Amino acid sequence: QVQLVESGGGSVQVGGSLRLSCAVSGLTYSSYYMAWFRQASGKEREGVAAIGRDGRASYADSVKGRFTTSKDNDKNTLYLQMNSLKPEDTAMYSCAIGSKPLYRPLTPGSYNYWGQGTQVTVSS
């Protein structure tokens, strides 16, 4: 059974930092590509950052220069370091993992499995 479990969310003030983690079990982690998505209240899910099988990262324009994604294959864990947080970053953040032939890094349809999410709230 594939499981993705996020952690590290919370409440921070503008300009603060958080580090999200996504622990993966039930599959051969290194064979997949992974991503972080977020969904704010009343808005559609948005791709934030993705990392391909080759380790190449992709980012949404809204987070470039502030967010960094990485993975630890030994720990089967994906990370999202979020710096210089803004109120508009407030959302439920979820990780996803996929193996489909057509890889579109920040497109939800490219992913097979999803975590439950962790809430990030940025206040001014």
Image: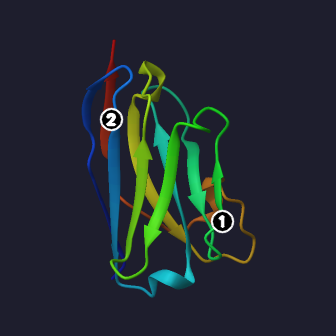
Query: Residue 28, percent across and down?
Result: 45, 88
Query: Residue 93, percent across and down?
Result: 40, 45
For the residue labelled by badge 1, is the local secondary structure a helix, a strand or a loop?
loop
For the residue labelled by badge 2, is the local secondary structure a helix, a strand or a loop?
strand
Q: Residues within 10 Å of mark 2 (few under 14, many from 20)?
A: many
Residue at which label 2 appears: 120
Q: Quadrant of the N terminus?
A: bottom left
Q: Is residue 9 visible?
A: yes
Residue in the picture at 37% in, 77% down: 76
State the separation of the CA atoms marked 2 and 1.
25 Å
| 2 left or right, relative to 48 | left
- The amino acid sitting under disc 1 is Arg
Residue in the picture at 48% in, 22% down: 88
Q: Is residue 116 visible?
A: no
Q: Quadrant of the C terminus?
A: top left
Total numbered badges shown on the rendered structure: 2
Query: Residue 97, percent across and down?
Result: 50, 68
The image shows residue 71, relative to residue 87, as above or below, that is below
Rendered image quadrant of residue 82:
top left
Say which of 52 and 25 sits in front.
Answer: 52
Residue at which label 1 appears: 56
